[in-house]
Image (cartoon, coloured by chain):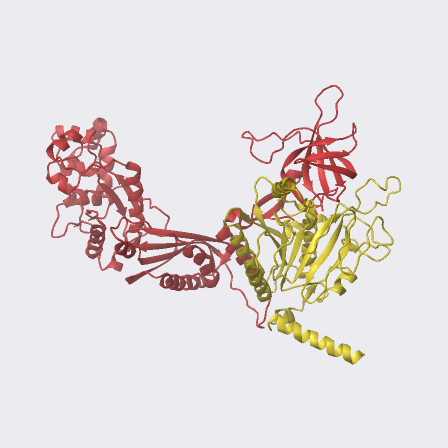
């Protein structure tokens, strides 16, 4: 067993990554050992990259590295002035990370490659963060060692064996020979670092255009305060949308907490809306049910302090054009055409879009296939009355899976005289039928057997029956009576009439 | 005396206004009640039909009577729990009322039901037989479990408050006085019309459900259908569906029971004037076999069926 990562204190005692556990214990008997958890580390890194969204929406995790280190990319074009300049922003960032418990160094440069190198290998000046001047990254970069170019260790080893120690040495070589010996990666990394090739960062989430942000001088702890702040943001967002004649279809609310956590809430609407009341109601449903964030703080007070919210962003991740609406002049209770959509939004928000459904008709003979239910928010057309009309009477309630019953019927075509369902016998006094529905021979069953349980590809004879109590059922017989075979056809109950 | 009748009518109006709590939703809207289409029933109800801005309850009949022996009671309990759900008769009756409300108020209908994946669901073509257009229907499924009743009540309240909903049907089993009063207030505030469909009670020996604040309470049971018109097999065909609708309690009205049948669009208009696509009263003199209706409301049709008071 080997060590994957060590703390600074352990490094001071002589432990290093890659050392065997036995050696480490020999050097330092009281060393505390935890299991290496790469997935947990990656998840924590992603969460931290999300949290860095308070500085800029363009953040990405650059992955775990050996020795327990990890990196985060931040593209801060245009964001630095919000934090008082580049230097102030970097020291704010590293200061906050240190308060949370990480040891961090930041590097800032024009290109991603140069920044990566500067963060890890740049010589620290008064502050531990390294800022390469704008346009002037070439010189400091050239002085850094080769390993700052993000090359694999074997390539670095071979280059060093050839006597190339610094980036300036590598840059001076002719490209053709370099490519022949080591592939195209070193050349590409050189160009990326010096800025000849663009290296864009793909951020964790696409930055929406409609995004508003509030930061608080003192973090908020009370729910009412948070709700009031969200309400202000919602009104400001709706004003902005109104000026551009757009409405929001999907909202994303992010609460950035002091302890480094981000809580993200999402809400959707069935029609574009810029009504702050409506949007606020959708968000409030979820805000009220937000669970308590877990924290590793030692006591409840600092856990509460860590859960306080210091920044809130509200973004409309999907929006559509929405014209100005003319409201009526007269007051009173008028029929609001949006009220139904708003009700559907509210119900979908709390129950899930899957649980608010409409029926869509399908052109088919099989009764269980005629009706498809789709979420109301999906906007599929429910058809009109004429699409639903069936030639023969149909029951208002249908079993999703027909249940098998025992029935006694005169052969070959007469309706049953008695049947037993769930242990209870029903004596049939009146019946109508048969209505013969043949299977759809042109349709192959889906390969995974999904979909409605069309249990058979047998012809069905449907009967509408009424028992002694007046209850009316819809039964069918699967298959025809055939005097050749011994197996009698089976009977099923499919629906309930009024 | 006409003067007395006028005074009585004015007093009734004032009492009704006090009961409503003074909100003017119905006065402005103009639609005070949803008529059922049968003059005998509409004139018996105090509002001339089903009152809007109110919640009405519909109970299912008990399918089997309760026997004295414990064994049979246990089997009944298990059996009813297994069958569960709202009966077909109540579903059809509610669908018919929903269709009328949809047409009268030109607004969609919301149906709130438990999400039972392996069981039955509403079927569009069947609902169309009762006049309910499936294209204007929104079905809300509530996940079953411990949270079913509060969530269903919340959804029902939201739908009752929304102004542009024609009618809300909800299949809810447990309801107490507080919750139903809250729903009634929500219906009055939003002008909505709510139907509560209650499955048959699980256990109670007296067959009684606890009182609620609904404006009317009905029980709908199935009856043998009408004799068919074809001469050659008059007894064998199921004919038109018939139900016994018992008004168990009404705010400001008396209990009564009627036998109704439903005529869908395919039947011809009756010579008595009952239109196709609506309810019709089954007259005791014309159609047989049929029981008589008594003013206090409850009859026995056969020894095997008892109607219990609620």
Chain B drawn in what color? Answer: yellow
Q: Residue at x 47, y 58 (%)?
A: A247
Farthest residue to the bottom: give it. Answer: B3
Residues A172 and A218: in front is A218
Q: How far across and down, in percent of the image, does residue A132 sit?
A: 18, 49
Asked whether A187 or B114 is in front, the reply is: B114
A314 on left or right of A115:
right
User: From the viewer's perspective, is B184 left or right of A473?
Assistant: left
Q: Is residue A142 above or below residue B178?
A: above
Q: Colour of chain A?
A: red
**Residue A375 at x, y percent in the picture:** 55, 47
Query: Residue B216 is drawn in which quadrant?
Result: bottom right
Of residues A425 and B128, the one nearer the viewer is A425
Q: Quadrant of residue A177?
A: top left
When the figure is inspected, residue A433 is found, relative to residue B91, above or below; the finding is above
Q: Quadrant of the N terminus of chain A?
A: top left
Q: Is residue B146 left or right of residue A35?
A: right
Of residue A485 and residue A428, the one placed in the foreground of this image is: A428
Q: Residue at x 72, y 31 (%)?
A: A407
* Residue depicted at 85% across the width and 50% down the height: B287
Name the residue rendered at 61%, 72% in the picture.
B24
Q: Residue A491, percent across and down?
A: 70, 31
């Amino acid at each position: 067993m080997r060590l994957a990562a060590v703390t600074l204190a352990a490094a001071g005692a002589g432990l290093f990554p890659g050392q065997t556990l036995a050696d480490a214990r020999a050097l330092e008997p009281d060393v505390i050992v935890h299991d290496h958890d790469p997935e947990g580390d990656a998840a924590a890194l992603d969460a931290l990259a999300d949290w860095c969204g308070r500085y800029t929406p363009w953040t990405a995790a650059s992955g775990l590295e050996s020795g327990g280190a990890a990196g985060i990319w931040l593209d801060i074009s245009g964001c630095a002035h919000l934090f008082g300049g580049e230097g102030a922003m970097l020291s704010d960032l590293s200061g906050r990370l240190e308060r949370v418990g990480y040891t961090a160094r930041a590097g800032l440069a024009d290109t991603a490659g140069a920044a990566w190198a500067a963060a890890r290998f740049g010589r620290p000046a008064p502050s531990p963060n390294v800022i390469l001047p704008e346009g002037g990254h070439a010189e400091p970069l050239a002085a850094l060692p080769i390993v700052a170019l993000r090359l694999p260790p074997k390539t670095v080893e071979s280059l060093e064996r050839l006597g190339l120690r610094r980036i300036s040495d590598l840059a001076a070589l002719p490209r053709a020979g370099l490519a022949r010996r080591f592939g195209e990666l070193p050349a590409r990394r050189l160009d990326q670092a010096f800025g000849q090739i663009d290296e864009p960062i793909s951020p964790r989430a696409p930055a929406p255009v409609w995004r508003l942000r509030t930061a608080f001088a003192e973090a908020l702890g009370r729910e009412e305060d948070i709700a009031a702040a969200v309400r202000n943001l919602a009104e400001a967002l709706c004003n902005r949308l109104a000026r551009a004649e757009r409405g929001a279809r999907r909202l994303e609310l992010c609460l950035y907490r002091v302890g480094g956590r981000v809580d993200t809430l999402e809400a959707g609407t069935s029609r574009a809306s810029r009504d702050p009341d409506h949007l606020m109601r959708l968000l409030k449903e979820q805000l009220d049910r937000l669970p308590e964030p877990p924290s590793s703080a030692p006591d409840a007070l600092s856990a509460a302090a860590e859960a306080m919210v210091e920044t809130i962003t509200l973004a409309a991740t999907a929006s559509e054009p929405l014209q100005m609406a003319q409201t009526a002049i007269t007051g009173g209770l008028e029929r609001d055409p949006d009220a139904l959509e708003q009700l559907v939004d509210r119900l979908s928000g709390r129950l899930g879009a899957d649980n608010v459904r409409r029926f869509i008709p399908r052109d088919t003979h099989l009764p269980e296939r005629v009706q498809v239910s789709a979420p109301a928010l999906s906007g599929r057309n429910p058809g009109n009355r004429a699409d639903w009309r069936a030639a023969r009477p149909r029951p208002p309630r249908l079993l999703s899976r027909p249940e098998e019953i025992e029935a006694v019927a005169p052969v070959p075509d007469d309706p049953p005289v008695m049947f037993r369902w769930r242990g209870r016998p029903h004596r049939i006094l009146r019946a109508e039928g048969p209505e013969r529905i043949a299977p759809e021979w042109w349709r192959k069953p889906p390969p995974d057997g999904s979909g409605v349980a069309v249990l058979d590809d047998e012809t069905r004879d449907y009967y509408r029956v009424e028992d002694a109590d007046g209850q009316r059922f819809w039964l069918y017989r699967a298959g025809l009576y055939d005097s050749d075979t011994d197996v009698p056809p089976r009977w099923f109950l499919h629906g309930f009439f009024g | 005396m006409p003067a007395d009748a006028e005074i009585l009518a004015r007093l009734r109006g004032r009492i009704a206004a006090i009961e409503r709590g003074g909100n003017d939703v119905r006065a402005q809207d103009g639609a005070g009640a949803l008529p059922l289409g049968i003059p005998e029933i509409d004139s018996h109800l105090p509002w001339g039909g089903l009152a809007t801005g109110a919640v009405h309850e519909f109970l299912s009949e008990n399918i089997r009577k309760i026997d004295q022996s414990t064994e049979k009671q246990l089997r009944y309990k298990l059996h009813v729990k297994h069958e569960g759900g709202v009966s077909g008769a109540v579903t059809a009756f509610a669908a018919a009322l929903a269709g009328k409300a949809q047409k009268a108020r030109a607004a969609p209908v919301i149906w709130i039901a438990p999400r039972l994946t392996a069981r039955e669901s509403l079927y569009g073509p069947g609902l169309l037989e009762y006049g309910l257009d499936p294209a204007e229907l929104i079905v809300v499924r509530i996940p079953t479990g411990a949270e079913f009743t509060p969530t269903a009540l919340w959804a029902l309240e939201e739908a009752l408050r929304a102004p542009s909903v024609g009618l809300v049907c909800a299949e809810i089993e447990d309801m107490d006085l507080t919750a139903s009063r809250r729903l009634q207030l929500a219906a009055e505030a939003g002008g909505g019309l709510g139907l509560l469909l209650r499955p048959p009670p699980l256990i109670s020996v007296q067959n009684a459900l606890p009182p609620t604040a609904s404006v009317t309470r009905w029980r709908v049971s199935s009856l043998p259908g009408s004799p068919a018109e074809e001469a050659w097999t008059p007894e064998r065909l199921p004919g038109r569906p018939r139900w016994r609708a018992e008004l168990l309690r009404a705010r400001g009205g008396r209990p009564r029971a009627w036998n109704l049948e439903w005529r869908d669009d395919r039947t011809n208009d009756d010579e008595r004037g009952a239109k196709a696509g609506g309810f019709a009263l089954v007259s005791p003199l014309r159609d047989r076999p049929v029981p008589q209706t008594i003013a206090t409301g409850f009859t026995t049709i056969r020894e095997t069926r008892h109607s219990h008071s609620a």
